[in-house]
Image (cartoon, rainbow, N blue to C red):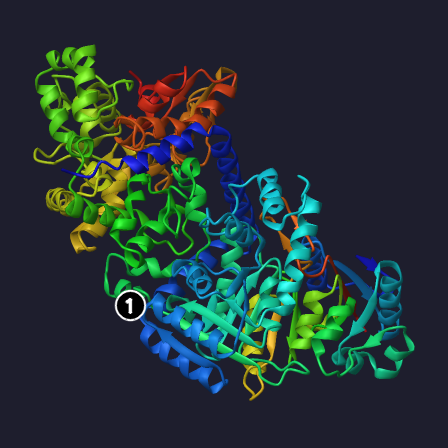
Amino acid sequence: MTTATLNATPSPIVEEFTKRFEQQSGRDHFCSSKTEALSTIEKIIAERARGLAYFTKAVSQMMGASSVHSASLYDLPSTVNGLDIIKQADVAITTASYGVAETGCFVEIAYEDSTKLLSSLSRVHIVILEAKNILKTLQELAPILRTELSGKDKPTITLISGPSRTADIEMKMVLGVHGPHEVHGILINE
Amino acid sequence: MPKDYDPLKEEIADSISHYEKSRALGAATKRSRNARTTQLLSLADPEGLLSDIKRLKTSAISNLDVLLEQFVSSCEKNGSKVLVAKTGQDVVNYVVDLALKNNVKLIDKSKSLTTEEIELNHHIEEKGINIVETDLGERIIQLANEKPFHLVFPAVHKSQKEIAQLFSSSFKIDVPDDLDEIMKVIRKELRPIFLESEIGITGANVAVAETGSIVIETNEGNARLVSGIPDIHVVIVGMEKIVPTWEDALKLAMAHPVSATGTRLTNYVSMISQRRPLEGHSKRELHIIVLDNGRSKMREDPWFREALSCIRCGACMNICPTYGVVGGHVFGYIYPGPIGIPWTEEVHGLDKTEFAHLCISCGLCREICPADIDIPMMIAKVKERDVEANGQITPNKVLSRSDVFAKFASSTAPFSNWIIQSKVSRAFMDRFLGIDKRRNLPRFENNTFEKRFKKIKKAISSPSAKVVYFVDIFANYNEPRLAEKALKMLQDQNIDVELPKDLKSSGMPYISYGELKKATKIAKHNVNILTSFVKQGYDIVATEPTATYCLKEVYPKLLDHSLDSELVSKHSFEFFEYLASHSEKKNTKTAQTRKQIGFHIPCHQRGLSAGKYTIDLLTRQGYDVKVVETGTCCGMAGTFGLKKGDIGYNLSMAVGKPLFDLFEAEKTIEVIATESSVCTQQLIDGTKLRLVHPIDLLSSD
């Protein structure tokens, strides 16, 4: 866990969330503003990226389009075949609508499969979450799911707890099987 | 002629001879068990989670017809195509048609036991369509052309080296025995499969009726790709997976990994309700196939209905003593392990369920099951059907009638002892009765406890309590001396003890060997007698843990939870449990005199007190008690370890070996205390230590 500023001291719920997420080999970064979040993301990319970094539309909506474009990131463009673009991504930057402290997971709500595939296929996954949206227990998510799935368009919702993993060979844990080898949580506590 | 089970025996012998493999499997299952316990204890309310699982599954199964209708209609509203498939063949036909219609050449899959159940891959490959598993463990199994060894860890029996060799020969490249290199190879092999597959097939861990959604849990994230990339996503889900609400679904999403691997949540939990668009792909389809394949029939059968509550966590195979030695290829058809017995019998047929005879009736699968499924009784029922269809084998016939044999041997003792212990007759018994000649047999007493009782029973004028002593075989015919001490200990507390004349022994051996009708007859007989005593204010105690287990857990099940059986169950206690609540707690010796003593918890005691009252009393008496355990059975399992050969003595000793080793490694322990007569025999035969009954340590005589 990295805390950039002192006044971003996390609440007990956020603390539990981070503890659990990091036990699952994820890494959280605390930011007290969107600006700080952006510079943290840029720093992670500078340190970890080996190829292109793409972000979803939800990221620009959340962070403000102009600020995102000023950073050296690639928007996920509309193309003839979304898959071709996703295949090139080394780093995925996506948003989570909620977090769950009890299990340390991010809740990704995807209306398009490009979002889900971006966070599934890239090597490094950076997921942005507003700390105020962290729920205490998994059960609190049930009514939220009901609401999210009440409209005509029903998103695919995924709980993401850390990097892709397996213990299928001699029960030895390996990270980064098919999907992300590392997952960075950007927690914005404004 | 009853079946000889020779192929099964050969497989067992082969497993036992590969000791290192068994040892590795045992270590893996133990690790999973320990992780499970640790994670459960870390939860705010572990008991709450487990009781919620039982409740919600029971309720979902009883409302299954309504839920199925609701699920189908919700899915259709979401625009998904739904098929309720009666049989596996219906699923195969649907998927093959879909593939042919769309000219599909490549299908990828994420892990699904339901598709294993119907051998989908095999049928699709027959049509010339390439189908590739993307879960690492399943891919290994697919390349090796095997069936899953374990529900959760399908390839746990393969060493890294074997996997490197398998990949080398399958992919025609040189793969070194190095985990990172192996991972690079599998990643490179599967990436194009993910990107080029035209149909993606997944299972579902849960189906949610209220929104027509399915939940898929994977740690690797492969199901996200399988369900996201191909334009056609096919979900195949067993109908027992449907729950009404998201509250229930999320409880299951937590219970699955907690009970399976000891983690709180599976790494990726995908909740899919509708096919989502992808730019450049105009035709995106979601097909949901709900599979029956015998499940409706199971639901109608009171003996097997509960099996539908299985959440497929694999905990029962992690604790099963014989599975831990032979693994899922011997202990399984497609569904392995304890719960695999009722499931195989119901969906694949009795002829595929020979491996039921590997069950030694220890009952541990029930103790660990998060849905509290009475797996042991279902297995007993499967054994009964097997006996009805194929006849009873001789040793089972002999040993299920242990009570008759004991009575006879005792009445003819000491002559019978001389016969039983002689080499010639042991050779005869080995050959013709199937009682292994290597096993030490206990001696029989002519002067049984029943005979002694009248002489030593004290008349107590104003007793503090009244009990029936359920004496059972061993304490009556083999060690009446122990029963006498037990009687005295009770009478010393001013407790009035009765020994009803016509009580039969517990009948547990009949259950172990699938003779449920006889077991039920005994249960009825004993419950009738005991009920009249309970109604006069008596409780019931037994010194043999299996006897208490029968009275409390088994009789009610056999007697369909009749009021009387439940009454008897409620009033039945373990000997030391009863004694502890009817005597003053006092410490009699000081810490300096402490003598270390090893303690073995019999399996049937685990479902009762797990020995806590006995351990407490021993500690108060100044003993330094150390529980030595593998967490599973010692291997004797009633009379199982008496039987000759591989479905008996050999397997019994292989199961016991890790426990024997643990006791041997305890340098300061010279004496083992345990309350079970059969565990005592096993530990005498398996270790060099002295065995005592806690009664011998705690009685004042």
User: Looking at the picture, how far across and down is residue B546, in whole percent?
Assistant: 27, 36
In-image side of B165 versus B416 (left or right): right
The quarter of the rendered structure image containing the N terminus of chain B is top left
Q: Is residue B239 visible?
A: yes
Q: Looking at numbered disc 1 in the image, what kind of residue is underneath it?
A: Ser
The quarter of the rendered structure image containing the C terminus of chain B is top left
Going 63% across and 65% down the picture, which residue do you hit? B194
* Vertical side of B223 occupied by B46: above or below: above
**On what subunit does the disc labeled 1 rest?**
B
- Count of numbered circles in the view: 1
Badge 1 marks a residue whose secondary structure is: helix
* Vertical side of A148 occupied by B291: above or below: above
Going 29% across and 68% down the picture, which residue do you hit? B296
Q: Nearer the viewer, residue A34 or B1?
A: B1
* Vertical side of A40 occupied by B558: above or below: above
Q: Which residue is mark 1?
A: B296
**Residue furthest to the bottom:** A152
Q: Nearer the viewer, residue B284 or A106?
A: B284
Q: Is residue B248 visible?
A: no
User: Looking at the picture, how far across and down is residue B518, in whole percent?
Assistant: 13, 43
User: Looking at the picture, how far across and down is residue A171, in whole percent?
Assistant: 59, 44
In-image side of A186 versus B580 (left or right): right
Q: In terms of image quadrants, where is residue B522?
A: top left
User: Looking at the picture, how far across and down is residue B563, in whole percent?
Assistant: 18, 55
Q: In terms of image quadrants, where is residue B320?
A: top left
Q: Residues within 10 Å of mark 1 (few under 14, many from 20)?
A: some
In-image side of B78 versus A62 (left or right): left
Q: Nearer the viewer, residue B587 or A69?
A: A69
Q: In terms of image quadrants, where is residue B420?
A: top left
